[in-house]
Image (spheres, helix red, strand yellow):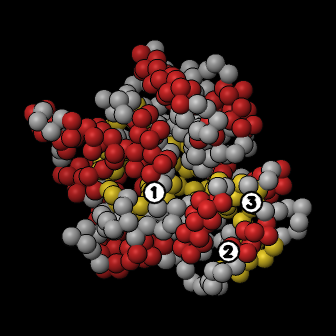
Amino acid sequence: MNDIQRRLAALGTGIPEILLPGSGVSLNKWAVIACDQFTQDMNYWEEVKSIVGGEPSSINMIFPEVYLEEESAEEKTERIINIRSSMETYLNEGIFAPPRRCCVYVERSAPEHPKRRGLVLTIDLEQYEWTQESRPLIRSTEGTVTERLPSRIEIRRGAPLEVPHIIVLLDDEEDLLIPSLGKIARQNPPLYETPLMINSGAVSGWALDTEDALALLAEGLEELADKSTKRYGSTGGQPFLFAVGDGNHSLAAAKAVWEEYKAANKNDPSLIENFENHPARWAMVEVENIYDPGIAFEPIHRVVFGAEPAELLEAISVIKDIRCIPGPPEKRVIYIENLSQGIVTASLEPLLDSFVKEKGYSIDYIHGEDEAFRLAASRRAVGLILPPVQKEGLFKTVAQTGPLPRKSFSMGEACDKRFYLECRRLY
């Protein structure tokens, strides 16, 4: 490990060995949106499968969450077996180009927002925790629903590859670091560029692997870590450098599998010898700046299945820091206004959890008002339309109080989410 790598490792980051599809693979069919999107829209995922056909695609290496409630335990097990089989097939049949050790500077255009910039690298799971009381270098922004972890843990446990959709945020008010790295990366041809399926824009990526570029990355992260300590203080000597914006459950699953692996191999000399560099200790993510103009914070709406508007309105109207406004009867929605400077979900979510448990109803978290309207009107359900979320102050809030309630915000609408492209070997 050279000096730059040591500096990056001290900041919880590493340089991954990237696997990308070879020249014969259609990137438009390979790249598929994050598995936790369109969770109530089976037609979207059926369209994805229709577009892909029988060609190589990341759809065969992920578990779209739309199927979680539709499939039996046996069907889920079979799906996970098929995911691992697809990974092995793609590795063995030359679907991937030769691996390249580098970071990747990414530019993503989406239908409703300006170009968004990011950097693909690895983060150290030893420096990440998602629990409410923890204050590590890499922190969750939202509560983790433990019931959502088992399927993701099962997929990652023993899988030869990781195919991540995790986005981790930096608090870079001047928006200097990632654009500066982009200027260096763009001096060379891109590693990939492709339009994205189903009207989701386009994405391009450039290798970032020169000594000068990686030194600039280390220097920039060091400066941001120092600023974070001055702004938020530190716990146990740890600054607050990274906040998990999307994919927290995938990252929590990666952490769980790493802890399992450590426990099972704690007496294995090879683990001890290779502890710092073991691939399972690291998770590949895309780092983005929270102040990037292409990142729009959107509310995540709630749809309560089984409820009637009047009973839900009565239940949540007792919350003092929100105002509830019934929508037109045919839409079956309730609009929520925020009367405080806090996050609406802080007071709303505990009451909703209690309400659905008591009544035997269910709840889902929906990106986009139109989808919430559709679900509420087409089923016996009620949509709760939440107000906009301000990105300013997110780091400070998480630093002071820990993770927000689950599904408190979204980085863009569903079609803006990260598409799977880069892969990395785990074993």
Percent across and percent down for residue 277 are 22, 41
Q: Nearer the viewer, residue 120 or 232?
A: 232
Residue occupied by mark 1: 144
Residue at the image position 73 percent from the left and 55 percent from the top:
306
Residue 185 lies left or right of residue 234; in this view the side is right
Q: Name the residue nearer the viewer: 256 or 166.
A: 256
Which one is earlier in the sequence, the residue at label 3 or at label 2? 3
What amino acid is labelled 3 in the image?
A: Ala
Residue at the image position 22 percent from the left and 41 percent from the top? 262
Q: Provide the residue designation for mark 3.
A: 307
Q: Earlier in the sequence, mark 3 or mark 1?
A: 1
* Closer mark to the observer between disc 3 and disc 1: 3
Front in this rendered view, residue 283 or 172: 283
Kindly indicate whether the residue at mark 2 contacts the one at mark 3 (C-beta within 8 angstroms).
Answer: no
Quick one: quadrant of the C terminus? top left
Tag of residue 190: none
Report the disc number at residue 316.
Answer: 2
Q: Position of residue 161 (x, y in %)?
A: 40, 31
